[in-house]
């Protein structure tokens, strides 16, 4: 790896927006993977625990179930 491109751990942790974006992408991918395999997910909405059906997840993300 090029020395100029290396970042220290401190520098990476200091970039909160990059961390937030990476976590968001990971969560989105995990939720979509569940939905595409027909599995519901649990969420906290309006102060309650709710199960979200795969069809609802895909609709919320504007996706279709993989064939």
Image: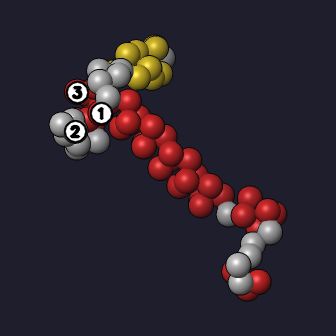
Give coordinates of residue 52: x percent, y percent. Answer: 34, 21
Task: Tell me if mark 3 has few (under 14), some (14-19) or many (20+) residues whose alpha carbon lies within 10 angstroms of its own.
Answer: some
Q: Earlier in the sequence, mark 3 or mark 2?
A: 3
Q: Earlier in the sequence, mark 2 or mark 1?
A: 1
Q: Quadrant of the N terminus?
A: bottom right
Horizontal arrangement in the rendering, residue 5 relative to residue 54 (left or right): right
Residue 25 visible within the image: yes
In the picture of the structure, the residue carrying the numbered disc 1 is 36
Residue at position x 41%, y 23% in the image = 41
Give coordinates of residue 64: x percent, y percent. Answer: 19, 39
Q: In this view of the protein, which residue sits in the foreground, 32 or 51?
A: 32
Task: Tell me if mark 1 has few (under 14), some (14-19) or many (20+) residues whose alpha carbon lies within 10 angstroms of its own.
Answer: some
Secondary structure beneath label 1: helix
In the picture of the structure, the residue carrying the numbered disc 2 is 66
Label 3 to label 1, Cα distance in Å? 9 Å
Mark 2 near mark 1, Cβ–Cβ under 8 Å?
Answer: yes
Residue 55, which numbered label?
3
Label 3 to label 2, Cα distance in Å? 12 Å
Residue at position x 44%, y 20% in the image = 42
């Amino acid at each position: 790896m090029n020395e100029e491109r290396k970042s220290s751990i401190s520098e990476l942790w200091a970039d909160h927006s990059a961390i937030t974006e990476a976590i968001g992408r990971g969560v989105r991918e995990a939720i979509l993977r569940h939905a595409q395999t027909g599995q519901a997910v649990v969420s906290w909405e309006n102060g309650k625990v709710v199960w979200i059906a795969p069809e609802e997840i895909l609709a919320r993300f504007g996706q279709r179930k993989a064939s």
